[in-house]
Image (tube, grey):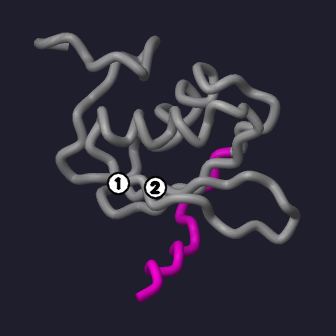
Amino acid sequence: MSAAPIPAPDITVDGTGLLCVTLLLKLRARIADAGPGTVVHVIATDPAAPLDLPAWCHMTGHRYLGSAPDDTGRAVYALRLAADARPTRPDAPWHPAEPGH
């Protein structure tokens, strides 16, 4: 039984040349107004991205879908936004938002 194919993106975030910290800031800003079920493809050159993106999805509740095919050979990772995602700090998207903010 094979895994389901990665769906086409609704949003693409190009993180070429960015470290994961900056990539997550950019990703958080781009998905701020996106609805649940939105498929996001993230282009990443940081070697830590295959670890950091699934970890961030786990922390926030978004669903990490895995590596997405790319005709140009770039590293692309897919995720689906969750309706009940846990918020993160605007200045530090790898930290949960503080209560009451």
Q: Are marks 1 and 2 in contact (CB under 8 Å)?
A: yes
Residue drawn at x 72%, y 32% is 46
> Foreground: 30 or 65?
65
Instruction: Determine whether, in the image, residue 33 is placed left or right of residue 6.
Output: left
Q: Which mark is residue 79?
A: 2
For residue 84: magenta?
no
Q: Nearer the viewer, residue 85 or 68?
A: 68
| Residue bounds of the magenta highlight | 1-13
- Comes first in the chain, label 1 or label 2: 1
The quadrant of the rendering that contains the C terminus is top left
Task: Look at the picture and state if 47 lies above or below 68.
Answer: above
Can you give x and y, in whole percent of width and height, for residue 52 in the image?
A: 52, 33
Residue 63's disc is 1
Q: Which residue lies at the image location 69% right of the left edge and 23% below the top edge?
A: 19
Image height of 88 relative to 29, above or below: above
Quadrant into which the N terminus falls:
bottom left
* Residue 81 coordinates in the image, percent (x, y): 35, 53
Q: Classify mark 2: residues with Cα within 10 Å, few (<14), some (14-19) or many (20+).
A: many
Q: Please tell me which residue is depicted at 52% across the width and 80% down the height of the picture.
A: 5
Quote the CA–CA distance across marks 1 and 2.
Answer: 5 Å
Q: Is residue 2 magenta?
A: yes
Residue type beneath disc 1: Arg
Q: Main secondary structure of the magenta part?
A: loop
Q: Secondary structure at mark 2?
A: strand
Q: Which residue reaches farthest front?
A: 1
Residue 20: image quadrant is: top right
Q: Position of residue 4 (x, y in %)?
A: 44, 80
Q: Amino acid type of disc 2?
A: Leu
Disc 1 is placed on an element classified as: strand
